[in-house]
Image (cartoon, helix red, strand yellow):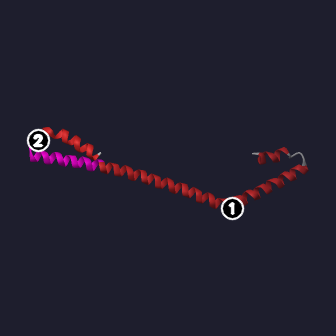
Amino acid sequence: MFLAALQEKVSKEPLLKQLAQDVVVEVHAHLQEFMRQQLPKLYSHAYDIKRKRIFHQIEVEANDQDQKRRRSSRNDWFNEIKTAQVQANPRYVSHCPQIYLTLLKCIL
């Protein structure tokens, strides 16, 4: 902002005008050198941040899928137990809720 306004502020003074132009040229040269030296580091840092974010997203999704798979496996297992109990002894079904709760406590 200062450099942009500098030209206008010194436009009425010819000696200052040339000095301001020289300052702007020098600042641009320093900025270009700084960017040339620092850009590879900035790119590397940005790449590392992006890579870590992607790995974190993959980890979160993998954990979510693992939880869903475990839930599904538990449900399938309970359904198999229900089916087996009904087929083995239909009168035993009335005692199943307590068995299910006991099994659920053991699993969870």
Of badges 2 and 1, the one in the foreground is 2
Is 76 placed left or right of 48 in the picture? Answer: left
Magenta-highlighted residues: 71-92
Is 22 placed left or right of 101 in the picture? Answer: right
- State the image coordinates of residue 81 (x, y, percent, origin top left): 18, 47
Res. 12 image quadrant: top right
Within 10 Å of disc 2 (Cα), the crowding (few <14, some 14-19, many 20+) is: few
Do residues under tags 2 and 1 come within 8 Å of each other at their CB atoms? no
Residue 53 falls within the magenta-colored stretch = no
Res. 82 image quadrant: top left
Callout 1, which amino acid? Gln
User: Residue, x 53% and y 55% (percent of image)?
Assistant: 50
- State the image coordinates of residue 75 (x, y, percent, origin top left): 25, 46
- Secondary structure type for disc 1: helix
Callout 2, which amino acid? Tyr
Q: Earlier in the sequence, mark 2 or mark 1?
A: 1
